[in-house]
Amino acid sequence: MDTLGNRIRTLRKQRKMTLATLAGDHITKGMLSLIENDKANPSMETLQYIAEQLQVDVSSLLEEVNIVELRKTLEKVEEIYNANTRFEDGPRLEIVNLIKPYIEELPVCYESGKLLYYYTDVLSDLKMDNWEQSLERGLAMFKEMNMMNEWMKMEILRFSIYFYEHNYEQALNVGLATEEEAKNKHYMIDPITVLDLLYYIAVTYLGINERKKGMDYLQKGLQLSKKNRLFYKIDDIYRVACYQAIMDGDDQARTYYFNKLDQYATFAEDKLSYSYMFLIQIHYYNSFARDYEKASNLLEQYAKLKIEDFTNTYFYLVEKGKNLYYLSHIDEALQELEKFKEMPPYLHHPYDLSMLAEVYSYKALCYEQKGYLSKALEEAKRGVDFIEPFIDTPYKKFINQTYELLCNKADQLT
């Protein structure tokens, strides 16, 4: 760890100064040697003299950690954090190991606050202790520097940690309290950061079955976007609204939001946005309109997009499998569904998880068709157990009904 003595010695050598040339009327060569070896504590007057001779601000000597060193560490941490491998344990542990040596002596500065942000995020991901302590330090630090935009980002991090733990009510309380404090104290916050908060509050309300409040917050997000001419999160907002309309059976709203998604994708020329549009349509025709031929044609078109997105792949496998099942291609359906090995660890919303949980039910239906009733019951029960904590949706209803159907068939055979 960097110390005052090390900093003085490093600066002196960089400037090619000997102890004798640094010494003067205020300090002897011997005292300087003691200070550089951390065996003496200089007075503020002495520190001021040393700083003047080294041509640095005295605050640079007083910092417990060198800012330049912190900045380089932050750059390395952000490089790892923003890479595609950030969800893997190896890179996350690397981030912890990069930050940990500094954690006890971080000075109040932007770099320290951001390092505390990443440290908190990774500690929580790894289910390690003390993430709350790091988060509170970061929040206090950003407030002390009056960096309220970074403060809100850190509160959003707290929100997301609770959300990812499926503590939706606790997450919502954090989000609403953050919004209220920022509003009442007139904090200056970037509209993009505010939009993030509004979006997360909206989807959390929807996730706990507070539909009206959720849609109200989506509308607040849209109004903020229009007011500030922002396109950030527009496709996310329209996509959530479209799925909600599908589940509500509101064809007018579904058509409206789908058209908005189409307009955005065309304007942005975003291949990923196009893929979302296809998946929404496929899901609608498979699970609600029951037009399996239409869904099959759309699945073929989607495959031609060659989207390399992990999240989309999971939803594609479920939709492809259920479509093949309804078209009576049981072996092919099961082959697709078996590619779905486990729930993606980065999806946490009840809607996403409920939709994907249908994979267990369709596997079960395929096994039942092939005469493996015991295996079918096992898969169906996995779906029921997985879906149990979540709110009622058409997907939860289907999963529970599938299990009941198979249980009745098993009873008839005994």
Image: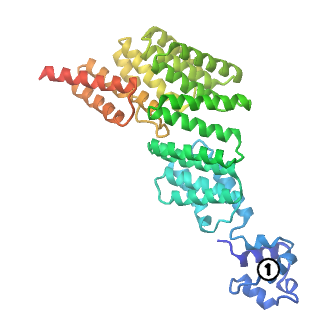
- Judged from this view, the residue extending furthest toward the left is 414
Q: Is residue 271 visible?
A: yes
Q: Is residue 276 above or below residue 65?
A: above
- Residue at 60 percent across and 37 percent down: it is 198
Say which residue appears at 84% left-offset and 82% top-offset: 18
Q: Nearer the viewer, residue 233 or 282?
A: 233
In the image, 339 versus 265, the foreground residue is 265
Residue 323 placement: quadrant: top left
Q: Tell me residue 213's x, y (percent).
A: 52, 32
The amino acid beneath tag 1 is: Leu
List the residue tagged with mark 1.
47
Q: Quadrant of the N terminus?
A: bottom right
Q: For the residue labelled by badge 1, is the local secondary structure a helix, a strand or a loop?
A: helix
- Snapshot colouring: rainbow
Quadrant in the picture for residue 106: bottom right
On the image, the x and y values in percent for residue 100 come to 58, 63
* Residue at the image position 68 percent from the left and 86 percent from the top: 39
